[in-house]
Image: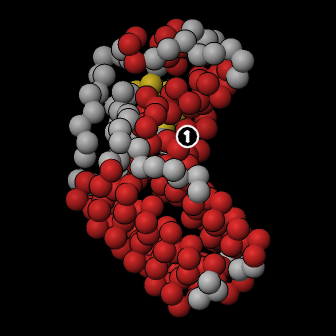
Amino acid sequence: MVAREPISAGISHAAVKPAARRTLADDVHEQLTALIMDHAIPPNTKVSIDELARQLEVSPTPVREALARFEEAGLVRKESLRGYFTTPLLNRKQVDELFEFRRHLEPWAAARAAELVDDEGAGRLLAELHTVHSVPPGTDYESYKALTAHDTRFHELIFSLADNQVMLAAFQRTNCHLHLFRLFYGTALASPAVSEHSRVADAISAGDPDRARGAMAAHIDLSYNRLKERAQ
């Protein structure tokens, strides 16, 4: 995993900036997301609401709101009488289970999307691919957050085009891309993934279920191979 400097005794004042007031809740959520994803708040560490509120120069309320959203996403957990803690990084068994889940669902979804695709659906896939203009060179959250968002949107779009809301909801509950990017990010991960997305989208847009299924299965397996050694 890319080395990130943890801040074990509170959050460095250099790591945060006062949140803008215009969109306070979103600004606080975004800044705390960066701190968690970059391990400035290390995994499996107690989160001090008051300390974060002081450093972000806000009241504790938007910090609590952000933590509630993180709890839903699995980035923090709340313990009775103890407060919030960041969750540990995915371990090898969890990575294996997550990719096993994806292998069952996503190739089917890609094939089904290819069966149902129309011009509007193909246009949506192409538009999503065009949101990735270049692979970011950095290894911090600010560099790769746009790619994380694209990755999530792309895979969710395929479930949407497959017209299966139950599978889409199950996939969304895993927050898999958020947790996988938190485990590791780098150009070696990003560049192939973008190319693989193009192959999946081409097969779906062509209305070729077999090719779409195979392209998605290959993407999932290649993603797993890129990540499996990063988990302990």
Residue at horizontal 51%, vertical 50%?
133
Residue at horizontal 77%, vertical 71%?
120
Q: How is the image coloured?
A: secondary structure
Q: Nearer the viewer, residue 92 or 39?
A: 39
Is 120 displayed left or right of 223 in the figure? right
Residue at horizontal 71%, vertical 80%?
117
Residue 50 visible to the viewer: no
Percent of width and height locating residue 74: 50, 46
Percent of width and height locating residue 145: 49, 41
Tell me the SS state at disc 1: helix
Three-letter code for the amino acid on which mark 1 is drawn: Glu
Is residue 74 positioned above or below 188 on the image?
A: above
Quadrant in which residue 152 is drawn: bottom right
Is 53 displayed left or right of 42 in the figure? right
Is residue 27 positioned above or below 94 on the image?
A: above
Question: Total number of numbered labels?
Answer: 1
Quadrant in which residue 41 is drawn: top left
How packed is label 1: few (under 14 Cα within 10 Å), some, or many (20 or more)?
A: some
Q: Nearer the viewer, residue 73 or 4?
A: 4
Q: Nearer the viewer, residue 232 or 195?
A: 195
Is 45 displayed left or right of 114 in the figure? left
Residue 200 visible to the viewer: yes
Percent of width and height locating residue 93: 31, 62
Percent of width and height locating residue 43: 35, 36
Is residue 47 positioned above or below 176 on the image?
A: above
Q: Which residue is mark 1?
A: 71
Residue at horizontal 52%, vertical 75%?
200
